[in-house]
Image (tube, rainbow, N blue to C red):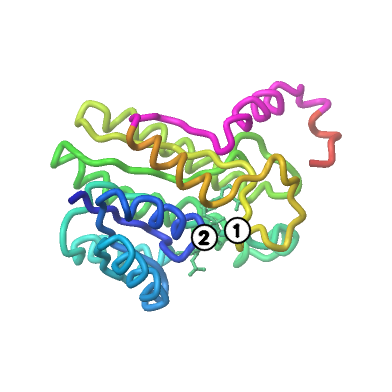
């Protein structure tokens, strides 16, 4: 039975991913801050799908703990899915370094720190799948969230480079680029329903991407073309837009 390590397992997307994959014969290592919150999810998938799960304390910002965290896992996971993220308060972050650093370190440094450990292990074993949830926000910096966007841009580039590096070792890396998704992260925002996905749609996209060995997937599909158009807008026009 393949084992999936889920980093940021309490997030709405992660819960949807676990519920999507649990009936399909996977077992789980659910890693999060205050991991005992995940007891209910663990028993739910155990009762309904006979899927097993172990719970693990994980803090993306505690970089020094990442090697020992990974070593402490009961088995090497076959698949690692990194769902951690922090949108933060863009206004506050513009002048408050602690908020800016939290955005940058959660979305980029913390994710890279733990995935480097996973990647080194998978590279040695010559197998494994790494899935990173990045964002279309990383494809062009906008005034409304350029710190979050720049961290996601770094993460997207990291995943791309990692995929290139690990290809020869038979390790597959999937980059997931959601547009808007209805989750607790965006609960305070008014999102356009037609452009916005549910966590269940993300989960379906992630699972299919793993199965079909996709490299880069968008949720929903049209975000690839929306971002292409946005990236084509000349800078002298783009800088005047309120985005
Ligand atoms: N929602 C969207 O519109 C959208 C769009 C594009 C991309 N994304 C990305 O999708 C992913 C999932 O986000 P979501 O929308 O499902 O929001 P979410 O429910 O807020 O999930 C974010 C998760 O990251 C975890 N996290 C934050 N800081 C952490 C840390 N220091 N250590 C460990 N875990 C930490 C949070 O843990 P706690 O539960 O402990 O707070 C939370 O479970 C994120 O990478 C996000 O950037 C979201």
- Across and down, in percent, residue 160 comes to 41, 32
* Residue at the spot 29% in from the left edge and 34% down from the top edge: 172
Q: Is mark 1 within 8 Å of ligand 1?
A: yes
Residue with the mark numbered 2: 12
Q: In the image shown, does 62 or 181 lie closer to the viewer?
A: 181
In the rendered image, which residue does mark 1 sit on? Answer: 183
Instruction: Give the farthest residue toward the front.
Output: 48
Between the C-alphas of marks 2 and 1, the distance is 6 Å
Front-lying residue, 233 or 24? 24
- Please tell me which residue is depicted at 30% across the width and 60% down the height of the picture: 49
Q: Secondary structure at mark 2?
A: helix
Would residue 86 appear left or right of 206 to someone viewing this image? right
Q: Is the CB atom of the residue marked by disc 2 within 8 angstroms of ligand 1's nearest atom?
A: yes
Residues at badges 2 and 1 in contact (C-beta under 8 Å)?
A: yes
Which of disc 1 and disc 2 is earlier in sequence?
A: 2
Q: Looking at the picture, how far across and down is residue 127, in whole percent? A: 18, 38
Q: Which residues are magenta?
A: 212-237
Q: Which of the 4 image quadrants contains residue 96?
A: bottom right
């Amino acid at each position: 039975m393949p084992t999936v390590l889920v980093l940021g397992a309490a997030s709405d997307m992660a819960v949807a991913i676990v519920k999507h994959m649990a009936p399909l014969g996977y077992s789980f290592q659910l890693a999060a801050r205050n991991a005992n919150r995940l007891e209910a999810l663990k028993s739910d998938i155990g009762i309904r799908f006979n899927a097993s799960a172990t719970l693990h304390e994980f803090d993306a910002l505690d970089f020094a703990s990442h090697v020992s965290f990974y070593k402490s896992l009961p088995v090497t996971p076959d698949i690692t899915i990194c769902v951690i993220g922090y949108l933060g308060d863009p206004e506050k972050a513009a002048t408050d370094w602690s908020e800016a650093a939290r955005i940058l370190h959660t979305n980029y440094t913390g994710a890279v720190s733990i995935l480097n450990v996973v990647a080194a292990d998978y590279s040695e074993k010559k197998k494994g799948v790494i899935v990173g949830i990045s964002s279309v926000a990383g494809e062009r910096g906008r005034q409304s969230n350029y710190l979050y966007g720049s961290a996601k841009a770094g993460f997207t580039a990291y995943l791309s480079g990692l995929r290139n590096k690990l290809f020869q070792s038979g390790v597959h890396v999937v980059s997931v680029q959601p547009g808007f998704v209805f989750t607790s992260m965006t609960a305070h925002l008014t999102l356009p329903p037609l452009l916005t996905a549910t966590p269940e749609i993300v989960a379906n996209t992630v699972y299919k991407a793993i199965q079909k060995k996709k490299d880069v997937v968008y949720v929903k599909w049209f975000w690839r073309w929306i971002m292409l158009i946005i990236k084509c807008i000349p800078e002298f026009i783009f800088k005047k837009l309120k985005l």
